[in-house]
Amino acid sequence: ETGVTQTPRHLVMGMTNKKSLKCEQHLGHNAMYWYKQSAKKPLELMFVYSLEERVENNSVPSRFSPECPNSSHLFLHLHTLQPEDSALYLCASSQENSGEHNEQFFGPGTRLTVL
Amino acid sequence: GQNIDQPTEMTATEGAIVQINCTYQTSGFNGLFWYQQHAGEAPTFLSYNVLDGLEEKGRFSSFLSRSKGYSYLLLKELQMKDSASYLCAVLCWGNAGNMLTFGGGTRLMVKP
């Protein structure tokens, strides 16, 4: 248990579906992240929220839409995805500007399959 | 952009020592992390280096040379449970603050 939870753990969806991934952190951190992990590729940063403001987008397609209603919750809304979007989606959180080394704590991920 | 290289796979024997190398080319370097990731699980923090030298933590040690853009993770007295992917990640300071860029990971297989 890292203090970061994600639901659902597994998701199968069609290309016309709309679904949302949820992440919650119980660590009192002020920054949250979405990463995509595909087979045989490095972890790719998708979105960063610091103090509930989006600070990094990294040119992610608009079919992925993040939402950060407060410092503890982060959502990733999905619509009209493609099969190549099938991957493990990881959420992470950290405490920025703490004077420490900004270690990121990861959730267990959501394994997404797009049919 | 950032470029991080590490071997794709390594194999070692239980009880032995293994060194996993990572080279990087980045701007705004602000530290280097090593994470461990077992199959189907979240990455977990192993070590952080920001100054040159060796950081030791039990069976795991991590080394950094900023001038060479080089780090390694040293695992001693290998156990079967050490079979996992080891991710090298560089923290860089940019317009959007501190951002982590990951290498592709090194999949370590420990054999009896």
Image (tube, coloured by chain):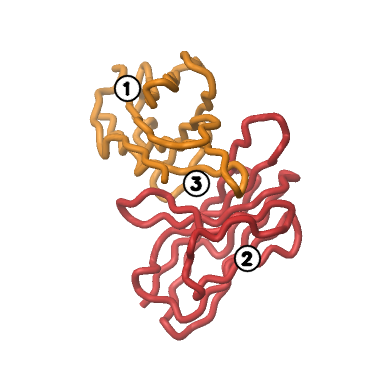
Chain colours: A red, B orange
Q: Nearer the viewer, mark 2 or mark 3?
A: 2
At horizontal 60% and vertical 54% (from top left) the residue drawn is A48
Residue A45's spot in the image, x, y percent?
49, 53
The answer to which image quadrant residue B67 occupies is top left
Within-10-Å neighbours for mark 2: few <14, some 14–19, many 20+: some
- Whether the residues at callouts 2 and 3 have beta carbons within 8 Å, the answer is no
Q: For numbered disc 1, what is the local secondary structure?
A: strand
| Residue type of the residue flagged with mark 2 | Phe
Q: Which residue is mark 3?
A: B42
Q: Quadrant of the C terminus of chain A?
A: bottom left
Within-10-Å neighbours for mark 3: few <14, some 14–19, many 20+: many
Q: Distance between the Cα atoms at labels 2 and 1?
A: 38 Å
Vertical arrangement, residue A95 with respect to residue A48, above or below: above
Q: For numbered disc 2, what is the local secondary structure?
A: strand
Q: Which mark is residue A75?
A: 2
| Residue type of the residue flagged with mark 1 | Gln
Q: Which mark is residue B19?
A: 1
Q: For numbered disc 3, what is the local secondary structure?
A: loop
Residue B79's spot in the image, x, y percent?
36, 25
Subunit bearing disc 3: B
Residue B60 seen in the current view? no
At horizontal 52% and vertical 71% (from top left) the residue drawn is A64
Residue A28's spot in the image, x, y percent?
75, 45
